[in-house]
Image (cartoon, rainbow, N blue to C red):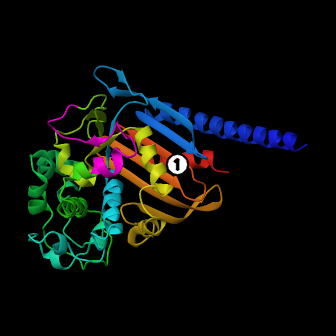
Amino acid sequence: MRKILLAFALFMAVNHTFAQYSKADTFIRSFTQKNNFNGTILIEQNSKITYKKSFGFADMAFKTPNTPDTRYKIASITKAFTSVLVLQLVEQGKIDLDKTIITYLPDYKGPAGTKVTVRQLLNMTSGMRNMDNNASSLDAVLKNGLPQYQLPYTSDQLLTKFCSDSLVKEPGKEFDYNNADFIILGKIIEKVSGKTYEQNLQDKILQPLQMTNSGMLSQDKIINRLANTYFYRDDIKALVSDLPVYMENWYAAGGMYSTADDLLKFSDALFTGKLLKQSTLNQMFTSGLGEYGLGVWVYLKYEINHKMYTIIKRPGSIMGAQTMLFHILEDGSTIIILSNTGTVSLDNLAAEIAKQIVD
């Protein structure tokens, strides 16, 4: 009888998983067709990949299709990696979250040096003038360009030129999404460790997790299987190639590439405590101003199918590079969406997929 019950339970679990897959597959197939989605979507449930498909083209001129092995620019998902590297150094006693910038960068010249803490950099409440204020609209960018990203700068030059500006708000009082905060964190990682940000990334995360399809973007590297990126210009109603930029200028704030499978390795390791202690994760996933934690958004009361869940979300967006890491904490499900065209709201897409896979 016990064997019969176990077999029946297994049958029901498999049948339930298949029903969820079918529902998700139907929705995603319809959505991608209607919205001309280009990219890769991966879903993990109960520690198993239940969905993984790619759509559209990695290179539109040559009609090269996206595949699960396509590497994508992951934009600000990079910030989650930077946060982990900082918090690992905190666990080692090498960084104190409540010490100021100048503690670790004694040559830092900006007024934030003696007033802004590492924690405030991580939770985006530095109060520093935003380095991307000149990118407030597409018209402004098309007219004036993006000098902080379209001219070659070393990370030291980025720190001095764009990340040492005046304080426009009192530190710790208001959330303001600012890439400068994470560029400063990248330099702190380098100073404390004595190694480059890229070497820290390789040594502490990519190599241990065997993330062989991930790394840092740079103009002087040709990355095999890297998708070209395209953004939508509303003024001419067409997709166009991204503006020419030096991707390495996003540095610790957005300079990485990866695949869906590699990001799942990172996600699984993060949420199972393989990269950080649980006490440290609790700090990382504490929702603060702007519903932001330490490098990720944390939504404590997120409704899915009339039930409330905690969502850990790390989106990314640089022109046509649109990315999403969406984790349902209580359910344990993870949705990863990587796209090379800026035509779809991945916030909305991830939310709709969640409705298909959560009871």
Could you tell me residue 217's position as x and y percent?
A: 23, 41
Count of residue discs: 1
Can residue 175 be seen at all in this image of the molecule? Answer: yes
Residue 71 lies in the magenta-colored region = no
Mark 1 closeness class: few <14, some 14–19, many ≥20 residues within 10 Å: many
Q: Please, what secondary structure does the residue beneath circle 1 have?
A: strand
Image coords of residue 251 (percent x, y): 21, 51
In the depicted view, which residue is nearer to us: 112 or 101? Answer: 101
Write down the region rendered in magenta. 201-222
Q: Is residue 202 magenta?
A: yes
The answer to which of 39 and 156 lies nearer the viewer is 156
Evaluate whether residue 137 shows in this view. Answer: no
Residue 294 sits in quarter = bottom left
Q: At x 41% / y 34%, what residue is drawn?
A: 39
Q: Is residue 310 above or below residue 17?
A: below
Residue at image mark 1 = 334
Is 353 above or below relative to 32? below
Majority secondary structure of the magenta segment? loop
Q: Please state if 193 lies on the left or on the right of 358 as rendered.
A: left
Q: Position of residue 5 (x, y in %)?
A: 85, 43
Quarter occupied by the N terminus: top right
The x and y percentages for residue 323 are: 38, 45
| Residue 285 in which image quadrant | bottom left
For residue 134, side relative to residue 96 (left or right): left
> With 286 as the anchor, is 102 left or right in this view?
left
Q: Nearer the viewer, residue 278 or 50?
A: 278
Question: Residue at horizontal 13%, vertical 47%?
Answer: 143
Placement of 201 over or under 329, stated as above or below: above
In the image, what residue type sits under mark 1? Thr
Residue ranking furthest to the top:
62
